[in-house]
Image (cartoon, coloured by chain):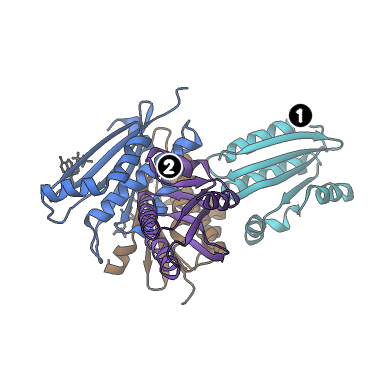
Chain colours: A cyan, B purple, C blue, D brown
Amino acid sequence: MDLMIDVKKEKGYTLISVNGEIDLYNAKELKDRVGYVCDDSPDGGDLIIDFKDVDYIDSTGLGIMIGIKRRIAESNGGLVLVLHSDRINKLFDITGLKNIFTITRSVDDAVAALKKG
Amino acid sequence: MDLMIDVKKEKGYTLISVNGEIDLYNAKELKDRVGYVCDDSPDGGDLIIDFKDVDYIDSTGLGIMIGIKRRIAESNGGLVLVLHSDRINKLFDITGLKNIFTITRSVDDAVAALKKG
Amino acid sequence: MSRSTKNSLVEVRIPKKPEFLRVVRLLVSGYASRWPISIDEVENIKVAVSEACNTAIQDSCEEECEEQIAIKCWHEGNQLVFEIKDKSHKGKSQDDIGELHEERGLGMLLIKTLMDEVDSKFGPNKGAKITMKKNLRSA
Amino acid sequence: MSRSTKNSLVEVRIPKKPEFLRVVRLLVSGYASRWPISIDEVENIKVAVSEACNTAIQDSCEEECEEQIAIKCWHEGNQLVFEIKDKSHKGKSQDDIGELHEERGLGMLLIKTLMDEVDSKFGPNKGAKITMKKNLRSA
Ligand SMILES: Nc1ncnc2c1ncn2[C@@H]1O[C@H](COP(=O)(O)OP(=O)(O)O)[C@@H](O)[C@H]1O
Ligand SMILES: Nc1ncnc2c1ncn2[C@@H]1O[C@H](COP(=O)(O)OP(=O)(O)O)[C@@H](O)[C@H]1O
């Protein structure tokens, strides 16, 4: 099961859906793909990253999410993560990353969160 | 995932449903459970073994099926195996066991096969 | 052993006990999935390696056996290679070994049918080594 | 090593390359599942062992590295023990090691939070060994 990354430009935001296990092996791939999206987006472009079928993420993956957050904040964009599984939520919780990110359980909620700002 | 074996007495036959991986570790458990059913059944009692969620069977498991077949034949009973997955069908195929057993794809077909004799 | 082989070598040792067979199957199918190979072929490898371990466990283990089975997986040319080795047949004679070989007929039949190349060595007081290869899809 | 420990010992060696991490996770979760333990705890072990392997891979591997990581799993008392060992920090000094330790903060944090006992040793030119334990449900 390799990482599958799907990018969709929607009205007002870009939706990146991720499937697979995010680890040291493929975290760079995720970083690069999201990087391209940021390069292509205007300043202030919003991003939703949907951890659709991600059942594993390691510290490398978490580290990359921090980098993405920083980059988007610099360009005044918004970032919302959609975490479906309890496991992944737990990992964001115990690392304290829950307090840094806006996290929702569904894409609809993520869109709503972006609108609120 | 340990082996799960469920036994149901129906009108005219006993239905044994199996879930899990059948290997050297637990094949004896399957042998014993089916053995008890045979002990309890009248001569000529029919048996359907439904490999419901079996996605793995090894030579030990196949060997035990041969033993069960022999035992039921001795008491003039009928035996039908319900094999759902292509994988398991393939293993019965390449070992030649397909020619020894009556095999169907559903329990309904198995009941029909028993009626035909 | 060549550099490319060493770069792909995964080794696992388990006690000679059937409760660890599932762990081997998980490892082996995870390993094989890394290469260009169909899911069906991965399943074939899983069955074959597990059968080879069965042989090792059934031929030589007593209740409180402290021996291990060593499984090696590596990539060589356009093939995946799996080697299953165990140390001793606890003093079994050449005749006993022949007999064992017969008994294990179904297992060996599966191994030979499911893999592309199989080589097995059994020796009195020596242990056994089964080496099996599976061709990969050419790129 | 006691007899009961040896009876449960599973060892695996992989090349120091990230593509084999998934294989380790499969093995470790399959191994842990054999004992009385919740699915959530099995997942915790999976993350912790994988993070320890990350450390080994990131700290010391060059492109064509031929070194291996050795992972041992065993049962001891009422605990499962996982030991992750790698041989060399390729001439890194004590200072470098300290720095590495910092960088790996998130990984070590996960390991320490998810496991019940953790002991780690890093040494210049020596390699690293992380030993971690998880309590089992009492019967
Ligand atoms: N002809 C044989 N008869 C019996 N056992 C053998 C034979 N050849 C190999 N073995 C078994 O395989 C083991 C190692 O064989 P070998 O080919 O030297 O592999 P390796 O180089 O991996 O150690 C021996 O210790 C023995 O147990
Ligand atoms: N204090 C330490 N500093 C650095 N490396 C260590 C230290 N202790 C152990 N190691 C590493 O662990 C390896 C083996 O440690 P040891 O405790 O003797 O385990 P084992 O008995 O399983 O070999 C050493 O080769 C070394 O790489």
Residue lying farthest to the top in this orientation: C139
Instruction: Report which quarter residue B27 is drawn in.
Output: bottom left
Q: Find residue A106 and report its horizontal and vertical position in percent.
A: 78, 51
Determine the residue positioned at 82% across, 32% down. A42
Q: Is residue D122 visible?
A: no
Please indicate whether residue A17 sits to the left or right of residue D114 in the image: right
> Badge 1: how crowded within 10 Å, few (<14), some, or many (20+)?
few
Label ID, residue B58:
none
Q: Quadrant of the N terminus of chain D?
A: bottom left
Amino acid carrying label 2: it is Lys
- Of the four image quadrants, the one with ligand 1 is top left
Instruction: Report which quarter residue D3 is drawn in.
Output: bottom left
Seen in the picture, residue D13 relative to C62 is either above or below; the reply is above
Determine the residue positioned at 53% across, 44% down. B85
- Circle 2 is placed at which residue position? B98
Residue lying farthest to the bottom in this orientation: D139
Amino acid carrying label 1: it is Asp
Q: Chain of mark 1?
A: A
Label ID, residue A40:
1
Determine the residue positioned at 35% across, 26% down. C77
Nearer the observer: mark 2 or 1; the answer is 2
Residue lying farthest to the right in this orientation: A116
